[in-house]
């Protein structure tokens, strides 16, 4: 574990005491508690190998005004943490440090962040997997202040470590891919509008089309519209359903009902309007279609290409109904003429968002396939800031709840054991957390 005999900065009067690089009376003074130079991390040396516990690894350095250093206390394990090494993707360099979300305390700030202070209990959502300084499987983690969320006192660090990645994926799927406006939910973001205020060259080129052309203004999801979530037991579904309900959408979840039905039906925050068993996917599609009668235009799949293909069959593109068009002449009192024949501008496409894999087939006419532009969170500060500050308000006001913790492992050294449990499918309907001393 980290040796406290090496201090990264000039020696401090007492371990844990606040230090300031500039004059303490200056409002922008950089602040830090003493931190060691070296720490313990988990290193991946090659695909399909366990992570190696490694001492005497340098503590990452913060750069610039927008970064803070956080002492890791609890890590939320994610499927990508075992899938990336097993299937050899998403590993930009070796040895690699993994881990996408954690909770802990701020031990260093630039002093310029308006929100974050030394000692704040925070959740760090580390979507930037290319920057090893920001990975969770280490004792100290660098975080962008706009990817860091302060926690209310009642929320434990363990609970907090479960919800960040799922929140960001859910908010971007709903807000960007479906155009949901969260303005009425504790002054949440209207991501559709926010993205159009960002200079288009500041949007990463590989997701620019999804951000700006993924959905047209007149087809954005509105309160009362239906959303189906296939794979309703997942952590990402847990957050997606909650945010969708807060925005006034009606929800369907497709799950293994024997395993998850009771839990979902009894949980006020994630109880859906319709709960469908996933065992027979063809029957699940029939049940959705017969209940919703052509009204389902939005689907989010959390499981993979096969269930995404089933979800596609449940979706129904539509047209703007004549009742939603103002007949010509009706406003000025003259006799109304019949509504125009529907053309392309009136089509309401169906929208399928895949978190894990899109159907193998191309999108049929009238349907748009989406992947979640997750990198918006760390690459576009205005989006990261909007989501992080909104999550702070949602947590402070108790408007969303964290997923269940299935179990807690102890120490960085237990991460491999935890990931093996996830590989074996033992972690279901909640999150596995690792506590770090
Ligand atoms: N694209 C993005 O930006 C993005 C963001 C977040 C997540 N994701 C992806 O979305 C998917 C869901 O993520 P999550 O964090 O929400 O998942 P999760 O909560 O860890 O688990 C999802 C569900 O998968 C089933 N499961 C568990 N272990 C399994 C295994 N070894 N093999 C097959 N199924 C297993 C369980 O459902 P049952 O008990 O019902 O079978 C579990 O409830 C993952 O593939 C993840 O990588 C993508």
Image (tube, rainbow, N blue to C red):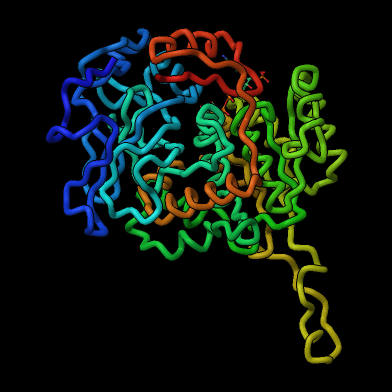
**Residue 77 in the image: x percent, y percent?**
49, 22
Query: Can you say which quadrant of the picture contains the C terminus?
Result: top left
**Residue 347 picture quarter:** bottom right
**Residue 68 in the image: x percent, y percent?**
31, 42
Residue 357 in view here: no
Q: Residue at x 22, y 18 (%)?
A: 3
Q: Is residue 248 left or right of residue 293?
A: left
Q: Where ligand 1 lies, by quadrant? A: top right
Image: 136 above or below 386? above
**Residue 276 in the image: x percent, y percent?**
80, 29
Foreground of the two, 228 or 412: 412
Q: How many marks?
A: 0
Q: Residue at x 42, y 32 (%)?
A: 104
Residue at the left extreme, as displayed: 10
Q: Is residue 266 left or right of residue 400?
A: right
**Residue 430 picture quarter:** top right
Residue at the front extreme, as displayed: 13
Q: Residue at x 61, y 11 (%)?
A: 426
Image: 213 above or below 405? below
Q: Residue at x 85, y 45 (%)?
A: 293
**Residue 278 in the image: x percent, y percent?**
75, 23
Image: 325 above or below 132? below
């Amino acid at each position: 574990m980290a040796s406290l005999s090496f201090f990264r900065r000039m020696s401090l009067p007492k371990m844990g005491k606040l230090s300031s690089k500039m004059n303490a009376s200056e409002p922008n003074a950089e602040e830090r508690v003493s931190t060691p130079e070296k720490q313990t991390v988990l290193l991946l040396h090659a695909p399909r190998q366990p992570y190696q516990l490694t001492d005497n690894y340098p503590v990452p350095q913060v750069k610039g005004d927008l970064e803070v250093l956080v002492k890791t206390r609890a890590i939320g394990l994610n499927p990508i943490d075992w899938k990336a090494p097993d299937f050899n993707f998403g590993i930009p360099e070796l040895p690699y440090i993994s881990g996408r979300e954690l909770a802990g305390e701020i031990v260093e700030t630039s002093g310029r962040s308006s929100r974050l202070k030394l000692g704040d209990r925070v959740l760090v959502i580390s979507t930037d997997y290319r920057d090893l300084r920001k990975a969770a499987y280490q004792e100290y983690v660098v975080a962008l202040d706009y990817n860091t969320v302060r926690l209310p006192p009642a929320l434990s660090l363990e609970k907090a470590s479960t919800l960040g990645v799922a929140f960001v994926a859910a908010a971007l799927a709903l807000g960007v891919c479906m155009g949901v406006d969260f303005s009425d939910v504790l002054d949440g973001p209207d991501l559709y509008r926010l993205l159009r205020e960002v200079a288009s060259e500041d949007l990463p080129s590989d997701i620019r089309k999804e951000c700006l052309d993924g959905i047209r203004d007149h087809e954005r999801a509105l309160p009362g519209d239906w959303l189906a979530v296939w794979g309703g037991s997942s952590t990402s579904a847990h957050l997606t359903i909650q945010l969708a309900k807060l925005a006034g959408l009606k929800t369907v979840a497709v799950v293994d009902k024997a395993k998850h039905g009771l839990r979902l039906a009894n949980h006020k925050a994630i109880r859906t309007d319709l709960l469908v068993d996933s065992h027979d996917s063809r029957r699940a599609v029939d049940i959705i279609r017969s209940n919703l009668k052509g009204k389902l235009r939005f689907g989010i799949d959390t499981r993979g290409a096969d269930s995404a293909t089933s979800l596609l069959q449940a979706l129904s593109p539509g047209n703007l109904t004549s009742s939603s068009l103002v007949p010509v002449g009706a406003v000025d009192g003259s006799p109304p003429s019949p509504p125009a024949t529907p053309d392309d501008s009136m089509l309401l496409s169906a929208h399928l968002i895949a978190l894990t894999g899109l159907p193998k087939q191309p999108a049929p006419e009238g349907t748009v396939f989406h992947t979640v532009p997750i990198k918006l969170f760390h690459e576009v500060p205005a989006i990261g800031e909007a989501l992080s500050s909104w999550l702070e308000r949602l947590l402070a006001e108790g408007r969303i709840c964290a997923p269940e913790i299935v179990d807690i492992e102890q120490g960085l050294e237990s991460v491999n054991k935890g990931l093996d449990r996830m590989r074996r499918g033992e972690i279901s309907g909640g999150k596995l957390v690792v506590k770090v001393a």
